[in-house]
Amino acid sequence: MTDSTGRGSRGKRERLVAAAGDLLHRQGVLAATLAQVAEAAGVPVGNVYYYFKTKDDLVRAVIDARTGQVHEMLGALQARRSPAARLKALIHQWVEMRDLIARYGCPFGTLASELDRRDDGLDREAAKPIAAILDWAEEQFRELGRRDARDLAVHLFAGVQGAALLTNAFRDPDIVTSQVRHLERWIDSLS
Amino acid sequence: MTDSTGRGSRGKRERLVAAAGDLLHRQGVLAATLAQVAEAAGVPVGNVYYYFKTKDDLVRAVIDARTGQVHEMLGALQARRSPAARLKALIHQWVEMRDLIARYGCPFGTLASELDRRDDGLDREAAKPIAAILDWAEEQFRELGRRDARDLAVHLFAGVQGAALLTNAFRDPDIVTSQVRHLERWIDSLS
DNA sequence: GTCTATAAGATGATAGAC
DNA sequence: GTCTATCATCTTATAGAC
């Protein structure tokens, strides 16, 4: 498959973003080097700059990919019958990621947390995945007939993100599991 | 004041740890350089190595200082009459730190979160401050007569840490404020 | 005991060959 | 359009002067 910018460039670009997504999560945005990204993607080191003008540009592409991943996940959750079922299915996603979280933290939360000190716009970008989740959860609570939908969404997702942080800090997948169970009961108690 | 290692060395060491504590929180552990720490402490750059063998050694000293800070805080909270009052006073600390959290994140949570990918022991060290808080909260719930004290402590503190993360990501101090209010009502509902 | 000068290594980024 | 060779900079760390 070819594209307007030349033969195969799209494929390599995508491989770079995929490899960077993994590495930025596992090593941290700052700790991950372009040399490591290039090697993981099977692309010559200096050549990364043909696809991305700077490292920040690559980071931006990774954030966009994660945001897309979130929208995909939220779209899949819409199949559930009730708002309460959708919310419970949402937070259950973190139970399924529990081992990854225990080792490297939540892929969405750590991204926002790591880029928070920057004020060049990348910090706002990094918050997009969790912003999308919050907005979606708010909508579900609204459909449940709650006036304080935003507040409830923040409460729910804060519980998830906090559990992810503790799960990661103590390397204990059971923390997020039991916390999600707790939050599921809370959702049920609202109906 | 002199000490066994020579005149004034203790003062400079303390200044370095204090400056490093600030910088590691505001810039992140990896992003903060020894040159910046030295300048902030008013100490020649290369001379940092007289007091700390490596950067990790300095980071360790900062973690120890933060752990001490936590124990001091928990000690002060013991003055409260009831376990419920102590727990509410605990989480209210994060409301008081709301502006700092909005800009740089929770000083205890980000430390654990930033050093989580290491497996050289520093990751365990970095979790000590939040471990101390969790243990203390667990004890309060136990005094409240709860069998599931650990679970409740995790639930409470996850709520706080998650709110801190969202507060930081969205630069909005109101998030942690309203979440703490929510958790205070939850504490009251347990008695 | 304190500090200056500098080494050693790595990283982001560029120029230019193919 | 693709990649190699290299630069300039920064950062940790050390050796040795005062």
Image (tube, coloured by chain):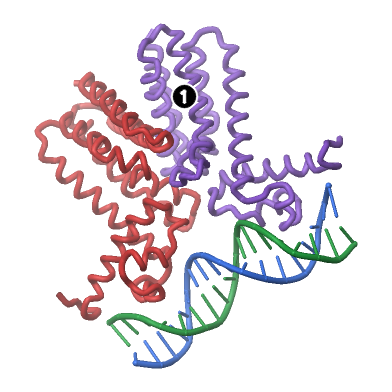
Chain colours: A purple, B red, C green, D blue
Residue C6, placed above or below residue B89:
below
Question: Is any atom of residue A99 visible in this view?
Answer: no
Judge by depth and name the residue closer to the eye, B30 or B57.
B30
Point out residue B138 in the picture as x, y percentages from the top left corner: 26, 35
Residue at 15% of width from left, 30% of height from top?
A: B85
Point out residue C12 in the picture as x, y percentages from the top left corner: 61, 56
Label 1 CA crowd tier, 10 Å (few <14, some 14–19, many 20+) = many
Residue A68 lies left or right of residue B83; in this view the side is right
Residue B93, placed above or below residue A54:
above
Residue at 31% of width from left, 27% of height from top?
A: B179
Amino acid at the residue labelled 1: Leu
Residue B181, placed above or below residue B86:
above
Residue at 24% of width from left, 54% of height from top?
A: B68
**Tag count:** 1
Residue B6, placed above or below residue B155:
below
Residue A102 lies left or right of residue A12; in this view the side is left
Q: Name the residue under label 1.
A: A134
Residue at 36% of width from left, 68% of height from top?
A: B38
Judge by depth and name the residue closer to the eye, A119 or B170.
A119
Point out residue B186 in the picture as x, y percentages from the top left corner: 26, 22
Residue A41 lies left or right of residue B1; in this view the side is right
Residue B169 lies left or right of residue B91; in this view the side is right
Question: Is any atom of residue B68 visible in this view?
Answer: yes
Q: Which quadrant is the C terminus of chain A positioned in?
A: top left
Q: Based on the displayed image, in which of its 4 quarters is residue B105 positioned?
A: top left
What chain letter is assigned to the residue under label 1? A
Point out residue B21 in the picture as x, y percentages from the top left corner: 33, 57
Q: Is mark 1 on a helix, strand or loop?
A: helix
